[in-house]
Amino acid sequence: MSLSDSIRQRLSVLAPSHLDIHDDSAAHAGHAGARDGSHFDVVIVSTAFAGKTRIQRQRMVYEALGDLMQQGIHALAMRTFTPDEF
């Protein structure tokens, strides 16, 4: 299973209505730390984010990803939305 697939599988606990995962690793080749993991940009839309602050939403994503943040993901840019915001 690819790292993108693992991310998709883990984020499914948030029941996203939209999930876009882009691997930006190639754009960071040669940068310090890039060899230790991949760079991803994620857009996730979920009703689970309703009433939550941006920080709370990010924590939810980090919690769902769990150990992938230490094993494989070097950097993660995320945009989190409710369906109404998206």
Image (spheres, rainbow, N blue to C red):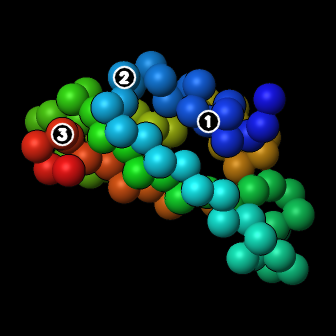
Q: Is residue 54 visible?
A: yes
Say which residue appears at 44% left-offset and 19% top-offset.
Answer: 13
Q: Earlier in the sequence, mark 3 or mark 1?
A: 1
Disc 1 marks which amino acid? Ile
Image-based side of 3 in relation to 41, left or right: right
Q: Quadrant of residue 33?
A: bottom right
Kindly identify which residue carries mark 2. 15
Q: Earlier in the sequence, mark 1 or mark 2?
A: 1
Q: Is residue 64 visible?
A: no
Disc 3 marks which amino acid? Pro
Q: Residue 61: which numbered mark, if any?
A: none
Count numbered badges in the picture: 3
Q: Sort mark 2 into few (<14), some (14-19) or many (20+) by Cα contacts within 10 Å.
A: few
Residue 77 image point, x, y percent: 50, 60
Most foreground residue, 12 or 51: 12
- Cα separation, mark 3 vs mark 1, equals 20 Å
Kindly identify which residue carries mark 3. 83
Position of residue 16 relative to residue 32, above or below, is above
Position of residue 51 relative to residue 12, above or below, is below
Say which residue appears at 59% left-offset and 25% top-offset.
Answer: 9
- Cα separation, mark 3 vs mark 2, equals 12 Å
- Cα separation, mark 1 vs mark 2, equals 13 Å
Say which residue appears at 66% left-offset and 65% top-offset.
Answer: 24
Disc 2 marks which amino acid? Ala
Q: Quadrant of residue 51?
A: top left
Image-based side of 1 in relation to 53, left or right: right
Residue 45 image point, x, y percent: 30, 40
Say which residue appears at 68% left-offset and 31% top-offset.
Answer: 6
Q: Earlier in the sequence, mark 3 or mark 2?
A: 2
Kindly identify which residue carries mark 1. 7
Q: Sort mark 3 into few (<14), some (14-19) or many (20+) by Cα contacts within 10 Å.
A: some
Q: Sort mark 1 into few (<14), some (14-19) or many (20+) by Cα contacts within 10 Å.
A: many
